[in-house]
Image (cartoon, helix red, strand yellow):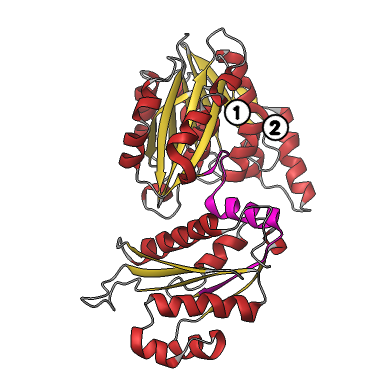
Amino acid sequence: MPKLPNAEIITIGDELLYGQVIDTNSAFLGQELGKLGIRVRQITSVSDRADEIVTALDLARTRADVVLTTGGLGPTKDDLTKHILTEYFGTELVLHEASLRDVEAIFARFNRPMLEVNRQQAYLPATCVPIRNLVGTAPGMWFEDRGTVFVSMPGVPFEMKRMMTDTVLPRLARHFQVPPIEHVVVQTVGLGESFLAEKIADWEAALPPNMKLAYLPSLGAVRLRLTGQADGQPDLRGRMLALLPALREKLGNHIFAETDIPLEQAVGELLAARGLTIGTAESCTGGYVAHKLTSVAGSSRYFRGSIVAYDNAVKTSLLGVGTETLAAHGAVSEAVVRQMAEGARQRLGTDVALATSGIAGPDGGTPDKPVGTFWLAYADAHQTLARQISFNRGRQLNIEYATSAVLNLLRLSLPPENNSAAE
């Protein structure tokens, strides 16, 4: 099989190093380059200093076939990238008329006068291939030098993404003529990465040489990405999909999707397919379960509402939790969370309901119920199920983990599609 090209990403800007801006560009670039079969080998962040940028470029070209930089193309004095690249490649800035027209069009669209500093953005290194920026004023640049491709793009995410999608990715595909790459994603929940790897070790060991498995863990879930490289045989994707039945047999209901979607979307699709509505009763998660469910486009088809019953008085008045139940068992208990789920289903008028109650921390725990103790519940017309989990990695992660766990409880508890939880 031919060698796959390597890439390095260089992000430029003091704001990245100070933590004032989160680098989302590199994640996008890595994902999109991976789809082409171009492997990102290193991501480097540097400040707005000429010497540091030049050093990063020198190092990158020793280990990468393509170097992509983001940032430093704006109109202000600290935007140095274009000038540094001009000197780095031993050329000069010249006015690029087509880029000037694009910049003028941006200002005309917003009915604003164009300043001289913005006109200067249309001056580009003479040896570069300009990359159009249809949503901003800073054109990108493509250089080829001693066998390495250099691509410079704005740091503004929506400008960079449009530039990559419209121009850079298609040009890279033509330039490197990378053999076709296929990705198959299997989403799992409820098994840690090491347990998962052990469970499918023999399946992974039997993969053909042109297919590799990557484990991509997140909180409570692991995404399995099977990547196949063309090997001259027909129907690469079909051969990859033919491996999945054996994987399903090993993992069973730990698989929640075979597409690249989050758990909340997967359970939303289950609810929509069954024509069921859902509501939530939340204490410790403070509405986070409802937030995850409603983050999915089209969730109004199945999501009715949520009661955030943080205080015990709200649990009794709005959800019908018995005061004697609270007194006997405490808010973080199976008895209470069951009544919360049942109360939410009745009061919100839904087919199914979820409930959470727990101790998210950092304090509030007891010897019997330490921080990270959670009770979760699912209720429909036929059954109420409760489950206890223990997880303590700090307040926010505790809330996120409990949310993932209760969504998984929903997934596992829903009746088959030909049955109804509402009957």
Q: Which residue is mark 1?
A: 124
User: Residue flagged by tag 2: what amino acid is it?
Assistant: Ser
Residue 99 numbered tag? 2
Q: Classify 331 as above or below 220.
A: below
Where in the figure is residue 299, as x and y percent of width and height? 67, 60
Q: Classify 11 as above or below 273.
A: above
User: Residue flagged by tag 1: what amino acid is it?
Assistant: Leu
Q: Nearer the viewer, residue 46 or 210?
A: 210
Give me the residue at 75% from left, 53% from top: 112
Cα–Cα gap, marks 2 and 1: 9 Å
Question: Is residue 78 inside the magenta stretch?
Answer: no
Where in the figure is residue 374, as x and y percent of width and height? 37, 69
Element type where label 1 sits in the image: strand
User: Left of 266 or right of it: where is 132?
Assistant: right
Q: Would residue 387 be seen by someone viewing this image from the given angle? A: yes
Where in the figure is residue 419, as x and y percent of width and height? 67, 57
Where in the figure is residue 235, as x and y percent of width and height? 62, 16
Q: Classify 127 as above or below 52.
A: above
Give me the residue at 40% from left, 75% from top: 334
User: To which quarter of the image does residue 376 belong?
Assistant: bottom left
Q: Classify 30 as above or below 48.
A: above
First to last magenta residue range: 256-281
